Image (cartoon, rainbow, N blue to C red):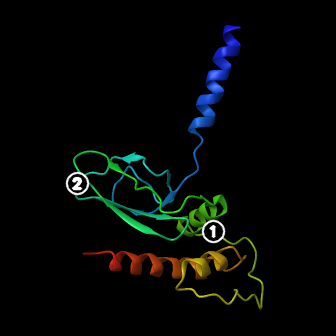
Amino acid sequence: MRSVVLGAVAAILVAGGAHAADFVVVSSTEPGVARGQEFAAGTPIQIAPGKSVVLIDTAGQVVRLNGAAGPVVVPRRQYASVNEDRVAVLKMLVGPPRVRRAAPGLGKVCPDADMTAFDGIVTVAQVDGCLTTARTAFEAYVDKALVSTRP
């Protein structure tokens, strides 16, 4: 009986710990935080003074967290739903470039999308052979968002 109770408690703890990521790290000057790492809203992160971490959520909101003496808390999202597919696309966009094992398809055309908008970038990133184009647009999108949030 005791093993059944302990098993149930362990299952509850594991299920409770499985929280969907709200943010993906775009860049970090903090050695303990890697590009592509996922964080849930409200998670405390240790960021040393003078260091920073740039996060993006699945809606395209870019946030820079600056280091402090104590832990810095990942902000709450403004949107209720977390789209797991978008988290996967964000991880592709910030991940290392893939090495192609075959020649690229000739005549392959990326979808016609607004590459200055987050939704357009996500759409193009999901098409085979268009990830490099989407990454370039994504980096420009993040840079523009960071400039517009500076005081």
Q: Name the image quarter holding the N terminus.
A: top right
Three-letter code for the amino acid on which mark 2 is drawn:
Pro
Q: Which mark is residue 98?
A: 1
Residue at 62% in and 24% down: 10
Residue at 46% in and 81% down: 140
N-terminal of the two: label 2 or label 1? 2
Answer above or below: position of 11 versus 50. Answer: above
Answer above or below: position of 106 versus 15. Answer: below
Answer above or below: position of 5 versus 118. Answer: above
Q: Kindly report the distance in space between the C-alpha atoms of the residues bearing marks 2 and 1.
A: 34 Å
Q: Secondary structure at mark 1?
A: loop
In terms of image quadrants, where is residue 89?
bottom right
Q: Which mark is residue 49?
A: 2
Q: Secondary structure at mark 2?
A: loop
Mark 2, mark 1: which one is toward the viewer?
2
Viewer-nearest residue: 10 or 25 = 10
